[in-house]
Image (cartoon, rainbow, N blue to C red):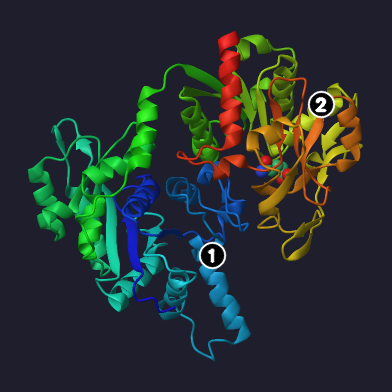
Amino acid sequence: MKNTSVKFIFITGGVVSSLGKGLASASLGALLQARGYSIKLRKLDPYLNIDPGTMSPYQHGECYVTDDGAETDLDLGHYERFTGVPAKKSDNITTGKIYSNVIAKERKGDYLGATIQVIPHVTDSIKEYILSDINHEDFVLCEIGGTVGDIESLPFIEAIRQLGNELGLTQTCFLHVTLLPFIKTAGELKTKPTQHSVKELQGMGIQPDILLCRTEDAIPEEQKSKIALFCNLKTERVIEALDSSSIYEVPISYHKQGLDYQVCKHFQLDVLKKPNLRRWNKINKIQKSSEGNVNIGIVGKYTSMIDAYKSLIEAINHGGLANNIKISVKWIDSEELENQNQNFNNLFKDINGIIVPGGFGQRGSEGKINAINFARTKKIPFLGICFGMQMAVIEFARNVLDLKDASSSEFGKTKQPLVGLLTEWQTDKGVEKRNKDSNLGGTMRLGAYDCKLSENSLIKSIYKKKIISERHRHRYEVNNKYILDFKKNGLMFSGMSPDNSLPEIFEIPSHPWFIGVQFHPELKSKPFDPHPLFSSFIEASLKKSRLL
Ligand code: GLN
């Protein structure tokens, strides 16, 4: 690729992790869009996994799935939610992926006998990735995972340094996100960690063009000048990034501090044209004016790690935006619901809607089934997502169809596999095949698939479409042998794969709102375009709250 007009912004982080680099990158992307530019956002992750697909959500947060079937870092979810640009497989690169490509090439003999080294072979491969699959975008924003100074991220830093050199100032900009800690006893924000982290970057040959300083308090002018002096940049390039009460305030707040202005100035673009921030102002206005409260209970296993459910929480909030209502999420640990004799009325006293989200493994599954039983019999709005849908099918089979052994083959051998391992399915590229011994990485039914909605169903009235496309990430599937039995007993499969072989959505017409979906609708919801399923679920929960 030799696109001489695309501009690259490399986003690095210093001082500590969890600085919100992903949000900062997504917000800058949104601001550039608001100035009329087209953008692409990418994440370069320094870990050795090929992708986060096999990583524990406890450690790494949710795994975000793209339309083209990649299991990626959760930051790609922020990117997509903030910009509406669908993330792609090529937008998340890891050290593991880079090395496996380099080694595969070496085995093929592509390096013609050369000694394979980090520089130039690994760095060349990173640069190739950064420059690949760019189709007329004005900007490509590349966030480098980790913190400057980590051993693991060195090849990435070196690769972007080389790109800065090769493409020059007119095509590259280095944005460094840091932290200014507030020391109570001294009563001031400290600039030293930022100075050190910039020195570290400079030592690797990178002079940041813009600093984005995370801070709890406004940065006094003299502190900004001090940072500028020590870090070798102009004071106006030291941007204050104050903590915000909502992530959707971030683009506006960074704009007010001049982030997009400085980026445009760096690239010598028109800075006089004002960005169109209507979309963001509208969201913030709704958020501020929302009245009332709906309590949504999420019954899951990783409830101590909210990043494990990042997209889900956002999608629920979007449903709140669509209904002008504030949402309180209550986390309910499924393992604590395993004992059926507990007082569920008490446990779910204030809950207006219940979600059982995606999940893996048997632990906690009986608690989820008990919660679903409660939602079904007490007519509480219920949304089952992927594993949550599978557990709802099992609950109904056990308690309504009287199939007492109903279970999922995910939990081991069972006489009544209501949910079974999916061994064969149709993709755009042909038939995919799996068996129980297949590798765990990248072997699920992944990415976007079409689904046909039934006439006269609640789901069709929600989507207002006949065919929808949603993203999947699962290995097991509801057994279509039982479809008629379910129907006779009041549970209807109202969404099927186009060839009618895979049950994708069910609903219970006699219940006010009880829907299970085999896919992950939360991945496609956006604050300015709330997902219809979440808008409708929150609406139903709101009605329920008014009945209480
Ligand atoms: N463990 C289930 C499966 O693989 C559900 C996965 C999920 O909820 N994403 O089918």
Identity of the residue drawn at 68% across and 24% down: 513
**Which quarter of the rendered picture does the N terminus lie within?**
bottom left
Residue 223 showing in the rendered view:
yes
Residue 413 location (% of width, % of height): 87, 41
Amino acid carrying mark 2 in the image: Phe
Residue 399 location (% of width, % of height): 84, 22
Quarter of the rendering containing residue 420: top right
In this view, the residue farthest toward the left is: 222
Position above or below: 542 against 82:
above
How many numbered marks have been drawn onto this rendered protein structure?
A: 2
Quarter of the rendering containing residue 244: top left
Question: Is disc 1's CB within 8 Å of ligand 1?
Answer: no
Residue at mark 1 to residue at mark 2: CA–CA distance: 43 Å
Q: Secondary structure at mark 1?
A: helix
* CA neighbours of label 1 inside 10 A, class few (<14), some (14 to 19), many (20+): some
- Foreground of the two, 63 or 547: 547
- Foreground of the two, 169 or 371: 169
Q: Quadrant of ligand 1?
A: top right
Residue 396, numbered label: 2
Please name the residue that numbered disc 1 is placed on.
96
Identity of the residue drawn at 80% across and 46% down: 502
